[in-house]
């Protein structure tokens, strides 16, 4: 009982923090609406998370207590689902995601060198977002473009035979 009271209190405080912070006020509205929409839906957690991510671009860590409370789940369960699925993100993402192929064919054609250059040019490691919020860098394991390795995808566009110079050109044109 004591633990339940404590959990309720911390949920209220998290909820308040989410609402009172000007930068996350909109987040709270989106999360509240999604919870209301899916609270009674069996297996509603996944569509709820997709909806929040579609609206905000990510699932704020501060929203986990509210989601857990609204869906009748523990925070650990909600966090477990978010972290299990690679497509869910709990940090803001860049406007464009760059996927750099790390699979064998691309490695054989020099993707390790390209990777080093890309990380240096963007100033981020895999999973990171550039300071200006433009790009998030992610690894990918084959883009289905092995014959034209090394391959990279910028947004929705796959580019073939990319080396450091070509990457810089692509970024300058973006
Ligand atoms: S291994 Fe890189 S595109 Fe297939």
Image (cartoon, rainbow, N blue to C red):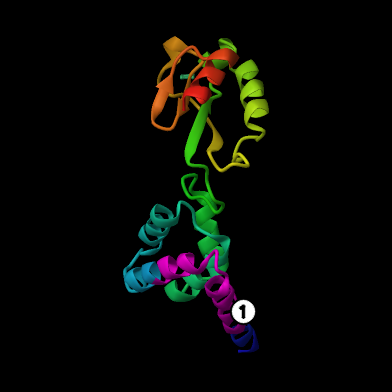
| Helix, strand or loop at mark 1 | helix
Q: Is residue 1 left or right of residue 66?
A: right
Badge 1 crowding class, 10 Å Cα cut-off, few under 14, some 14 to 19, many 20 or more, is few
Find out whether residue 94 is within the magenta segment. Answer: no
Q: Is residue 104 visible?
A: no
Query: Against 45, is 69 above or below?
Result: below
Question: Where residue 72 appears, x then y in whole percent?
Answer: 45, 75
Question: Where residue 74 appears, x then y in whole percent?
Answer: 53, 70
Query: Against 153, is 50 above or below?
Result: below
Question: Where residue 4 appears, x then y in whole percent?
Answer: 59, 84
Q: Is residue 141 left or right of residue 123?
A: left
Q: Residue at x 61, y 40 (%)?
A: 128
Quadrant of res 115 = top right
Residue range (magenta): 7-32
Q: In the depicted view, which residue is nearer to us: 162 or 35?
A: 162
The outermost residue toward the bottom is 1
Q: Residue at x 52, y 42 (%)?
A: 94
Query: Against 18, is 141 above or below?
Result: above
Q: Is residue 97 visible?
A: yes
Q: Residue at x 40, y 21 (%)?
A: 144
Residue beneath label 1, please? 10
Question: Where residue 116 appears, x then y in whole percent?
Answer: 66, 22
Quadrant of res 44 = bottom left
Q: Residue at x 60, y 84 (%)?
A: 9
Q: In the depicted view, which residue is nearer to us: 76 or 131?
A: 131
Q: In the depicted view, which residue is nearer to us: 24 or 146?
A: 24
Beta carbon of the mark 1 residue lies under 8 A of ligand 1: no
Quadrant of res 20 = bottom right
Find out whether residue 31 is within the magenta segment. Answer: yes
């Amino acid at each position: 009982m004591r633990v339940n009271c404590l959990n309720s209190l911390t949920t209220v405080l998290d909820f308040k923090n989410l609402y009172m912070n000007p930068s996350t006020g909109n987040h709270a509205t989106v999360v509240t609406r999604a919870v209301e929409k899916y609270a009674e839906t069996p297996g509603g957690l996944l569509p709820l998370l997709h909806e929040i991510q579609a609206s905000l671009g990510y699932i704020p860590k501060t929203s986990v207590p509210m989601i857990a409370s609204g869906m009748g789940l523990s925070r650990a369960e909600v966090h477990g689902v978010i972290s299990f699925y690679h497509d869910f993100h709990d940090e803001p993402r860049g406007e464009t995601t760059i996927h750099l192929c790390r699979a064998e064919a691309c490695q054989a054609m020099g993707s390790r060198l390209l990777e080093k250059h890309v990380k240096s040019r963007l100033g981020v490691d895999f999973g990171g977002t550039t300071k200006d919020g433009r790009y998030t860098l992610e690894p990918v394991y084959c883009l289905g473009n092995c014959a034209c390795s090394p391959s990279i995808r910028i947004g929705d566009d796959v580019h073939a035979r990319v080396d450091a110079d070509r990457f810089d050109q692509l970024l300058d044109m973006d």
